[in-house]
Image: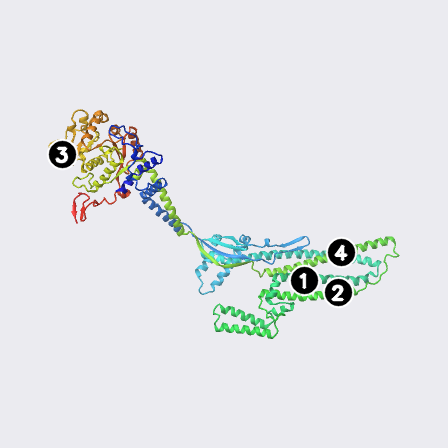
């Protein structure tokens, strides 16, 4: 019972806590000061507080009350929350399943290698640039017009290769053919959509992740697998085209320089012929000096060209690392590294390839694999016996074909460089040994005009010789650049600029049904709660006792459940332990402790509107007080729609129902004539009486006040049933003569605004409102307020049960 008192007194406990915090008077420090004649005060009275027995547990305040109210709102609208919570994920599932298109993703990673064509070649003022930023990176190749052509060609080769296999999927190959079409013709309709959207993302330096996104998973996976080879083909083709374009420009420059060189030679020959007419010995001198000088210049240029080409090859190979790897100390050691032409090293390479193939099928302990290992060791021993080792007495490992090719080229250039150096040294010795013939001064004995003419021809000849040397140097540079481009073109055609990392990853990106349904469930829960609070905000009715406290700040004293049509609505005196009797016992006890001054001595039962059950509650309260042993009188003050005589059986034995309250207030009957006994012991009834024109005037008269004083003097409890507060003024007029007013609120029927207006009218005239009782409450809403009493068996002895309709007890 103590737990129920705590729940019934939340508002008063909060008010008591607030007054104590403000330094108000404690209950023990104030006087009673309340009597029927004392002036009524507005509710809640500042000098009253609930008993200390009601404060056994701390009262939740602030956020706790808000949380409790929120939980009650969700529980009240649980069906709406459940429907939204289940409906949103269901809608998301149906949209994902039947309306949204599937989006598949295929990803592949690749790395971009450094290419050896990142160098500058210059021809006079015209640069031929092959820089790294001009090479075809992934992003440039991705937007290249040639990419789809390479993709379609690779797909065509894949389809042709798969068609020859017996287990090939013919239907899949047919779909691929429909997607890619014939590479020699234009793409089929919808090719880009079925191929998928291509995007690239840089993960690390030089490492890229290429994504193919669309609705054809198998096609996208194949496209992702062919992208890296297609990138290599496109980048190789563009680099080859750039190199060939530079080569063509160099060849054109070479032709132009050759034509200029020919013109210079013709002019030089003419000038030399004219000078020979004056200097007959100059011919012999030119025959000795000019060929030797030209040969020395050409030999020096050839030697410089060979050294430059050799340096470039060593740089591309990584000469220092290669020397350490193949144990090379001198250039002659390269002959021991090369495979071509050496049958033992060729046999070694075949055995190594066979071992690599067998390791894919057998373990290292397999007899055949071990036999191949023994043959490899035998070949190595034979190579050592025949002296096929380097200067460091080591058998060099097998090079790759690219390394072998570059080492052979280095060895060849080194031999040519040695020959070119020997030729240059020989020409230098010949030039030092040659002694020019003594020639007399050709100007001696010539006239002044002839001397001037000879000087001009000599200067002209020197200028032509300088121009001839410049054109020869230009021709040499062009030749060197053409040779570089030839080597570079050969390397580029064998290179791969992009290498694939790992395998192709394919997965379904959208719709992600599980994740979407989970997010839909979360969204549904949020929307369900929002709809519940929206409905709660739109619903202005009172449903639970907590709503009474939260919206009205009114102390609720009891909860009257909603009775079914077959259940009796009044207390049966022969069954005082029934469920309905227990409910009104709680209400009776809470009214007694709700306010000092004994509000139950003269209690007015009122409601905001008609039909809220105040007459039934007033009658049952009177019966409950009578069953407790009190002498009770029930006054039916509803002179407009009287119901007291219908709810309480009046003893009709020796006396008939002739007069009532209106008759006594009108002076037509005495007090003793309007008090009737009933079938309930200790309960008396003052009926409404005859219909009158102005009930409010009678209820507010001095005769009504005198009647109440006389009833309080003769009876222990006076219960008054009055009309509704809002339609008429009767309740407001009558409430000034009573000790307490009990407000009846019909759950789920009356609105908050109506009850607030009724309370305003009562408090405006100073009515002592003791609290409210919530009537017609569904058990599902507040079952914990009267849990255990619905069956009617809580107080029965063991082995007995009570029928809910009739109230009769039977033994089991």
User: Real-space Cα distance between discs 3 and 2?
Assistant: 159 Å
Above or below for 780 versus 314? above
Instruction: Provide residue 789's location: percent of width, then percent of height.
Output: 23, 44
**Mark 2 crowdedness (10 Å alpha carbons): few <14, some 14-19, many ≥20:** some
Question: Splitting the image into 4 quarters, where does residue 729 fall?
Answer: top left
Callout 2: helix, strand or loop? helix
Find residue 466 and name its label. 4
User: Is disc 1 surrounded by few (<14), some (14 to 19) or many (20+) residues within 10 Å?
Assistant: some
Query: Marks 3 and 4: which is nearer the front?
Result: 3
Q: Which residue carries the number 2 mark?
A: 427
Q: Which tag, 3 or 4, sits closer to the chain's start? A: 4
Q: Is residue 797 visible?
A: yes
Q: Earlier in the sequence, mark 4 or mark 1?
A: 1
In the foreground, 29 or 272: 29
Is 253 on the left-hand or right-hand side of 268? left
* Image side of residue 692 versus residue 381, left or right: left
In space, the residues marked 4 and 2 are separated at their CA atoms by: 21 Å
Q: Closer to the camera: disc 1 or disc 3?
A: 3
Circle number at residue 307? 1
Q: Report the mark closest to the observer, 3 or 2.
A: 3
Whole-Å distance between the Cαs marked 1 and 3? 140 Å
Dot 3: element: loop
Check whether the beta carbons of the residues at disc 1 and disc 3 lie within 8 A of each other: no
Residue 755 percent location from the top left of the image: 29, 33
Of pointers 3 and 2, the one earlier in the residue sequence: 2
Q: How would you rate the neighbour count of disc 3 (Cα within 10 Å): few for under 14, some for 14-19, many for 20 or more?
A: some
Q: CA distance from mark 4 to mark 1?
A: 26 Å
Q: Is residue 183 visible?
A: no
């Amino acid at each position: 019972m103590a737990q129920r008192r705590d729940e019934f007194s939340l508002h008063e406990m909060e008010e008591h806590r607030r007054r104590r915090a403000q330094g108000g008077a404690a209950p023990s420090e104030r006087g009673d000061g309340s009597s029927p004649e004392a002036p009524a005060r507005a509710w809640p009275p500042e000098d009253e507080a609930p008993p200390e027995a009601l404060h056994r547990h701390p009262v939740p305040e602030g956020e706790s009350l808000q949380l409790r109210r929120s939980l009650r709102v969700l529980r009240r609208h649980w069906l709406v929350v459940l429907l939204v919570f289940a409906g949103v994920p269901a809608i998301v599932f149906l949209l994902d399943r039947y309306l949204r298109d599937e989006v598949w993703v295929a990803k592949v990673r690749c790395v971009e290698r450094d290419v050896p064509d990142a160098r500058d070649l210059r021809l006079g003022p015209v640069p031929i640039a092959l820089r790294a930023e001009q090479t075809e990176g992934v992003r440039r190749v991705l937007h290249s017009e040639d990419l789809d052509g390479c993709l379609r060609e690779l797909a065509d080769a894949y389809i042709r290769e798969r068609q020859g296999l017996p287990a090939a999927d013919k239907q899949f190959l047919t779909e691929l053919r429909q997607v890619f079409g014939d590479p020699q013709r234009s793409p089929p309709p919808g090719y880009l959509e079925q191929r998928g959207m291509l995007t690239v993302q840089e993960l690390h330096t030089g490492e890229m992740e290429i994504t193919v996104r669309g609705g054809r998973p198998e096609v996208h996976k194949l496209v992702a697998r062919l992208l890296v080879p297609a990138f290599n083909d496109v980048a190789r083709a563009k680099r080859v085209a750039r190199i060939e374009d530079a080569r063509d420009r160099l060849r054109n420059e070479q032709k132009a320089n050759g034509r200029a060189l020919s013109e210079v030679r013709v002019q030089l020959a003419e000038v030399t012929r004219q000078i020979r007419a004056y200097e007959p010995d100059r011919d012999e001198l030119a025959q000795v000096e000019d060929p030797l000088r030209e040969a020395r210049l050409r030999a020096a240029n050839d030697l410089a060209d060979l050294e430059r080409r050799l340096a470039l090859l060593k740089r591309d190979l990584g000469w220092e690392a290669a020397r350490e790897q193949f144990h090379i100390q001198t250039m002659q050691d390269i002959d021991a590294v090369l495979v071509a032409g050496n049958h033992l090293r060729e046999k070694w390479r075949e055995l190594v390839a066979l071992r690599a193939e067998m390791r894919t099928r057998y373990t290292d302990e397999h007899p055949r694999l071990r036999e191949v290992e023994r043959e490899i060791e035998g070949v190595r021993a034979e190579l050592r016996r025949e002296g096929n080792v380097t200067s460091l007495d080591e058998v060099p490992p097998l090079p790759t074909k690219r390394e072998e090719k570059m080492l052979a080229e280095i060895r060849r250039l080194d031999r040519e460089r040695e020959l070119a150096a020997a030729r240059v040294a020989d020409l230098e010795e010949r030039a030092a040994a040659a002694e020019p013939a003594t020639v007399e001064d050709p100007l001696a004995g010539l006239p002044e005009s002839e001397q001037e003419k000879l000087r001009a021809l000599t200067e002209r000849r020197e200028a032509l010789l300088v121009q001839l040397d410049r054109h020869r140097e230009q021709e040499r540079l062009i030749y060197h650049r053409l040779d570089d481009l030839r080597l570079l073109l050969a390397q580029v055609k064998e290179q791969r600029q992009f290498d694939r990392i790992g395998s192709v990853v394919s997965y379904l990106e959208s719709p992600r049904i599980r994740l979407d349904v989970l997010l839909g469930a979360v969204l549904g829960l949020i929307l369900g709660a929002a709809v519940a609070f929206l409905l709660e905000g739109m619903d202005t009715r009172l449903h639970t006792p907590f709503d009474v406290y939260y919206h009205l700040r009114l102390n609720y004293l009891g909860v009257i459940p909603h009775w079914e049509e077959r259940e009796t609505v009044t207390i049966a005196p022969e069954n005082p332990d029934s469920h309905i009797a227990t409910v009104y016992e709680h209400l009776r006890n809470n009214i007694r402790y709700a306010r000092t001054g004994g509000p139950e001595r003269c209690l007015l039962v009122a409601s905001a509107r008609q039909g809220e059950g105040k007459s039934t509650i007033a009658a049952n309260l009177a019966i409950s007080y009578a069953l407790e042993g009190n002498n009770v009188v029930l006054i039916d003050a509803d002179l407009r729609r009287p119901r007291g005589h219908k709810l309480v059986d009046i003893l009709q034995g020796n006396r008939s129902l002739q007069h009532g309250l209106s008759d006594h207030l009108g002076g037509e009957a005495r007090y003793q004539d309007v008090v009737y006994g009933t079938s309930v012991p200790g309960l008396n009834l003052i009926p409404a009486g005859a219909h009158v024109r102005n009930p409010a005037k009678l209820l507010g008269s001095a005769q009504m006040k005198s009647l109440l004083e006389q009833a309080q003097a003769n009876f222990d409890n006076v219960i008054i049933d009055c009309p509704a507060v809002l339609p008429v003024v009767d309740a407001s007029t009558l409430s000034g003569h009573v000790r307490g007013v009990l407000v009846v609120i019909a759950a789920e029927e009356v609105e908050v605004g109506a009850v607030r207006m009724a309370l305003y009218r009562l408090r405006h005239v100073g009515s002592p409102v003791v609290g409210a009782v919530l009537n017609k409450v569904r058990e599902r809403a507040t079952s914990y307020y009267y849990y255990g009493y619905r069956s009617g068996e809580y107080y029965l002895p063991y082995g007995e049960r009570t029928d809910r309709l009739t109230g009769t007890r039977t033994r089991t």
